Image: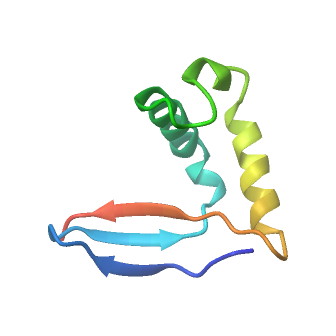
Amino acid sequence: MVIDSFEFKLKDGRIATIRSPKEEDSKAMLDYLYKASGETEFIMRYPEEWDGFTVEDEKAVIERMNNSDNKAMLAWLERTE
């Protein structure tokens, strides 16, 4: 399910945009998975468990979620004014 983008201003002045991920977000999202899974033990996987997961795999996940009738994935993008 594709969620239309919306923006809001964070307390520190940054603008956050929330939207469904696009195919071109695949690499950044995969990089985030590696980083986040190494920062805490409270995520289901360790960074090395993502080693076999490729950008093409992430693109397939995004496509599957965006084409679903009852599932959604959201991406948070930020920028400064």
On the rendered structure, is 59 left or right of 28?
right
Task: Please state which of residues 35 and 21 is positioned toward the viewer in this rendering.
Answer: 35
Q: Between residue 46 and residue 65, name the one nearer to us.
A: 46
Q: Position of residue 42 (x, y in %)?
A: 51, 36
Location of residue 20 with respect to 50 vertically, above or below: below
Q: Residue at x 15, y 67 (%)?
A: 12
The furthest residue to the left? 12
Q: Quadrant of residue 52?
A: top right
Which colour assignment does the render follow? rainbow
Residue 68 picture location, percent across and down = 83, 69
Figure check: 43 above or below 22: above
Looking at this view, is 37 or 2 the one in front? 37
In this rendering, the answer to whether 53 lies above or below 2 is above
Task: Name the image quarter holding residue 6.
Answer: bottom left
Image quarter hosting the N terminus: bottom right
Numbered-mark total:
0
Image spot of residue 20 (x, y percent): 60, 68
Residue shown at 22%/67% (left/top)? 14
Q: Residue furthest front?
A: 42
Residue occupying the point 58% across, 24% down: 46
Q: Position of residue 32 (x, y in %)?
A: 49, 40
Location of the C terminus (image quadrant): bottom left
| Residue at screen point 63% across, 35% down | 44
Judge whether 49 appears above or below 7 on screen: above
